[in-house]
Image (tube, grey):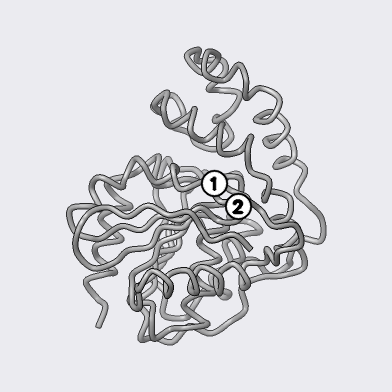
Amino acid sequence: MYPLKYEISGSGDPLVLIHGMGSASTAWKPIRPMLNQDFTVITVDLPGHGQTPYSKGQPMDPHSLGVYVLEQLTSLGIDRFHVAGNSLGGWVSLEMASYEPHRVRSLVGVAPAGLWLNPYNARYPGTAIARFLARYTAKIAPTALHFEAARKLGFADVSPRWKEFSYELCLDATIAMSTAEGYYPAWDGMLMKRFDSFIPESVPVTIIFGDTDRTLPATTCQERSVAPVHAKWILFPNTGHAPMWDAPLDVVDEIKKVAALAS
């Protein structure tokens, strides 16, 4: 297996940021500069995402990914840290806190996957469309994304605020999806599973969802009984599946708040 590609910036207590499926560490660009003021920020590219290659046959279920991230952090000399993850990255963060709670000082799940009663038994069709569009439009994306119609096609389902997204954000996200060899392996790693492990109260946990999340809708994918019993649950208004894009200041604020509770 390949070592995870990572980037470190800022100063302060370590904060690990984990992206979602078909995404990359570039997803955190809108909030990284603000977090750099209070934390040493470590972003990682999961296997088959961003700059980290995919090893065929590598376990891609959320627990295995969480253990692998923990191993990589150990190799970097990072023992204890705060963590925030989006979508699949949120689920990976939860697995990390359950597996080695003594290392996770605080956790923010930003629209985390895995909080459902009935696990998926097949890939969700809508995500296949997103992957198809990104792969087969990648060559024209740098030009096309200058136009509102192209941005709407790619991001209207992700966020009610897609018109506010910068060109750079849209291009980064499109490139990440189009090059993510680990996309379908990660999907298959989630099938027939949900987050079902215990996280002790010694790890402060905040869960954030947007009120218009179409990727992980409230009716099927935001089950509070599956989350840690002590977790603080927040619903952001006019926000989709990537709250760090829609409400960056609010996400940063919640990360700081939960980190302040850490022992």
| Image quarter (top left, top right, bottom left or bottom right) of the N terminus | bottom right
54 over 149 or under it: above or below = below
- Give how far across and how far down residue 168 sits, in percent: 41, 27
Q: Which residue is mark 1?
A: 213
Instruction: Residue 59 in the image: state x and y as whole percent.
Output: 70, 67
Say left or right for 112 vs 11.
right
Instruction: Give the secondary structure at mark 2.
Output: loop
Report the front residue among 160 and 139. Answer: 139
**Left-right relation of 105 to 149:** left
Left or right of residue 150: residue 247: left
Residue 253 figure quarter:
bottom left
Position of residue 63 measured from the top left corner of the image (x, y, whole percent): 61, 73
Task: Evaluate if marks 2 and 1 touch, with contact meaning CB atoms under 8 Å apart.
Answer: yes
Residue sitting at 42 percent across and 23 percent down? 167
Q: Position of residue 131 (x, y in %)?
A: 69, 37
Q: Which residue is mark 2?
A: 216
Question: How would you rate the neighbour count of disc 2 (Cα within 10 Å): few for under 14, some for 14-19, many for 20 or more?
Answer: many
Q: Residues within 10 Å of mark 1 (few under 14, many from 20)?
A: many
Q: Residue at x 65, y 30 (%)?
A: 134
Look at the image and tell me in which quarter the C terminus lies: bottom left
Vertical comparison of 64 with 60: above or below: below
Give whichever of 34, 224 is nearer the camera. 34
- Kindly identify the amino acid type of the residue bearing the numbered disc 2: Leu
